[in-house]
Amino acid sequence: MAAVEVRKEQAGMVPINFRDARPIYEQISDYYKQLILSGVMAQDEQMPSVRNLAVELATNPNTIQKAYAELIRDGFVYTVKGRGNFVAGGQGLLDQKRDELRETLIRTRCEGEQLGIDMDALWKEAKDKRGHV
């Protein structure tokens, strides 16, 4: 999932990058996952309708439906029959993401150490490159 910094007033503007190798539905899904995890979209908040989002993004409704299906499958969104899709939210999603990130860090650190890379120095270099202290 690509990092996207979004404020509440920008939440409706889904950025689609046609040069991105990822399919459009995946970009949409990743965008909403970031909004939900960062708290920009609150638990039980209604998602835009498939039709409205498709019109707004000038894309096929099937693309939006595929993105929503992924969000539902991953536990970020739930459906209320006849009413639409809503943000599942909750601490559980953030805990799940934290666990996934922890596992990624462990695998990355192990791989680096197997290659003889000083991972602490690499981390410091990466933080310095991004401008963080």
Image: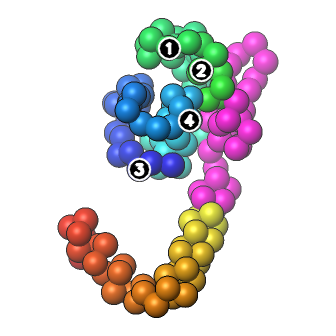
Q: Residues within 10 Å of mark 2 (few under 14, many from 20)?
A: some
Would you say residue 73 sits in the magenta stretch? yes
The residue type indicated by label 3 comes to: Ala
In the rendered view, how is the structure colored?
Answer: rainbow
Q: What is the secondary structure assignment of the residue under circle 4? A: helix
> Is residue 102 something one can see in this rendering?
no
Task: Pick whichever of labels 4 and 1 is earlier in the sequence.
Answer: 4
Residue, disc 2: 63
> In the rendered structure, are the residues bearing label 2 and label 1 in contact, judged by CB atoms less than 8 Å apart?
yes
Residue, disc 4: 26
**Most distant residue in the right direction:** 81
Q: Which residues are the magenta region?
A: 69-97
Q: Give how far across and how far down residue 14 sits, in percent.
A: 42, 28
Q: Give how far across and how far down residue 78 sits, in percent.
A: 72, 33
Q: What's the distance in space between the residues labelled 4 and 1, CA to CA?
A: 13 Å
Q: What's the distance in space between the residues labelled 3 and 1, CA to CA?
A: 23 Å
Residue, disc 3: 3
The residue type indicated by label 4 comes to: Glu
Picture quadrant where residue 44 is located: top right
